[in-house]
Image (tube, rainbow, N blue to C red):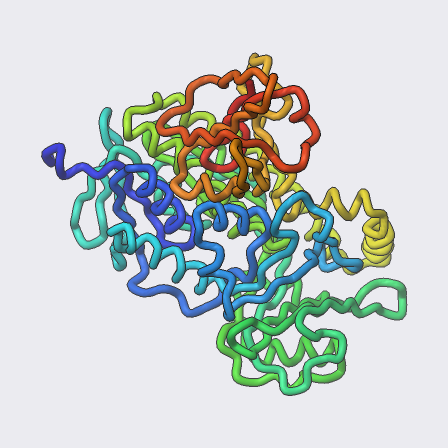
Amino acid sequence: MPSEQDIVDVAVVGAGPVGLWLARELTVGGASVRVLERDTERSPYIRAFGLQARSLEILDMRGLLDRVAGERSRKLPVANVAGLLPWLQLAGLDTTHPYGLSVRQNVVEEVIEEALGDLGVTVERGNAVVGLTTQPDRVRLKLENGESVSARYVVGCDGAHSAVRKLADIDFPGSSTTATYILADVTLAEPPFWMGQLGIRHFPAPDGSRLGWFMGGIVPDTGRHRIMVCDRESSRVTKEEPVSFEELREVLLRLTGTDCGAHSPTWLSRVGNPARVAARYRTGRVLLAGDAAHVHSPFGGQGLNTGLQDATNLGWKLAAVVRGDAGEEILETYHDERHPVGEAVIANTLAQTTMVFDFTPGGQHLRDLFSRLLEFPQVNQYLAGQITALDYAYPPPSGSDAHPLVGTRVPDLALKLDGGGTSRLFDHLKDAAHVLLVRTEAGAASSVPAAAPGAVHVVHGWPVEEREGWEDIRSVLIRPDGHVAGVG
């Protein structure tokens, strides 16, 4: 048996953006971490293509947003649901980042891995996990190369086909792919006039049904196009069937009458509409995050973003446990808070793909109706809040009489400090500690909410602009993930 010094606090399996982000959150929180990745090098393919507003807030909280949002990205003031028009408008959302960021997943991974390296943690590539044994005080992983790794906790961030989830025997209920579309990274010598930086077009059939749809845009930092195309014929091809460039050209010809001068493909893939969420995000010392915990259609651009939010929720809690500042029961709140979000994302992507893949006249009427509903500001803003994840609030502990603010997200507030001066809330969240805002103006009694696990930064200041629900409170304890822990 390995000696105690051979046991790492947390083994993170998977070095995609979710695993890398979780490893950084844990390391900042004081945990020792090993990051094990099956592949020997980072994928050259663009598996995701954008960050939603909530993910931008998370990166901003930790001081990394500027490293992601550079010349290799582009801001988009809109989002999309089910490939429909009008667009979801983001300008009115309660955030300092009312936009999406068009940026390659590869870039996000590079930035996070560099930041993780700055903390002394390197990714151990070429290490596939093939065995998992749980013991009372640790989990032992067996690697394909014969090495054994012992950790107090293991988190599977290893994707939809997660080895950790399978080895831990965690059920993954839901539905498998029933329809597919083609995704391609290509150069279009003659892109359609409506595409521009990002565009969508549906193609009607004479009988009132729909021939198919075509979405596409320019990938920042490459000058190439990412396109998604689908018609009735191609939607029936199984996900396992490889995509040929000739098939892509044939679908384009059937829809548009031209192949748009497509050439030089760098990636061709077939994307399905699976909908699965793990029965439990935690079993003992094994936890799941990202696609290992939930898998769904990419419509709405929520997959990568939901995974980053999983990691931000879990990171500070697991770090507090290994430091001894919190008991294991806090890990149950990870499932309690994030599993409903996973189910909500599954529900909205199923609704989207129902409209996307229904080519009948009835399906067209449904899309027309939904498009008209999107013209109502209340509907548009509600869906924007869901797609961007800005409107997700965590439920208070069962049986508690918590203040309505508990569990809600706090944006990057401008703060007026005692004695003069201002600051931003996110400036105080850089090291993933709790922040206590205290209102101490003349005549206001200062009360402090329940103690937090670990360090608390006390800020004697209050939002410059009064916020709904904050009128009669004197202090707010904010968790490292930017949600309210308690009020006083």
Q: Quadrant of residue 223?
A: bottom right
Residue 438 at x, y = what percent?
Answer: 52, 25
In this orientation, does residue 336 appear?
Answer: no
With 260 as the anchor, is 368 left or right in this view? right
Q: Is residue 17 visible?
A: yes
Residue 95 position, x and y percent, is: 63, 46
Q: Is residue 120 above or below residue 174?
A: below
Between residues 204 and 426, which one lies in front from this camera angle? 426
Q: Residue at x 61, y 63 (%)?
A: 75
Judge left or right: residue 323 versus residue 278: left
For the C terminus, the image quarter is top right
Depth check, front residue: 367 or 450? 450
Count of marks, rendered view: 0
Q: Position of residue 330 (x, y in %)?
A: 41, 24
Spot the residue most to the right.
Answer: 207
Q: Residue at x 28, y 29 (%)?
A: 323
Q: Does residue 30 sit above or below 192 in this rendering? A: above
Q: Tell which of 321 and 75 is nearer to you.
A: 75
As drawn, 200 above or below 464: below
Q: 11 or 66: nearer the eye?
A: 66
User: Seen in the image, is 411 located left or right of residue 128?
Assistant: right
Q: Quadrant of the N terminus?
A: top left
Q: Is residue 487 above or below residue 102?
A: above
Q: Position of residue 235 (x, y in %)?
A: 66, 63
Residue ID at (38%, 41%): 431
Location of residue 164 (image quadrant): top left
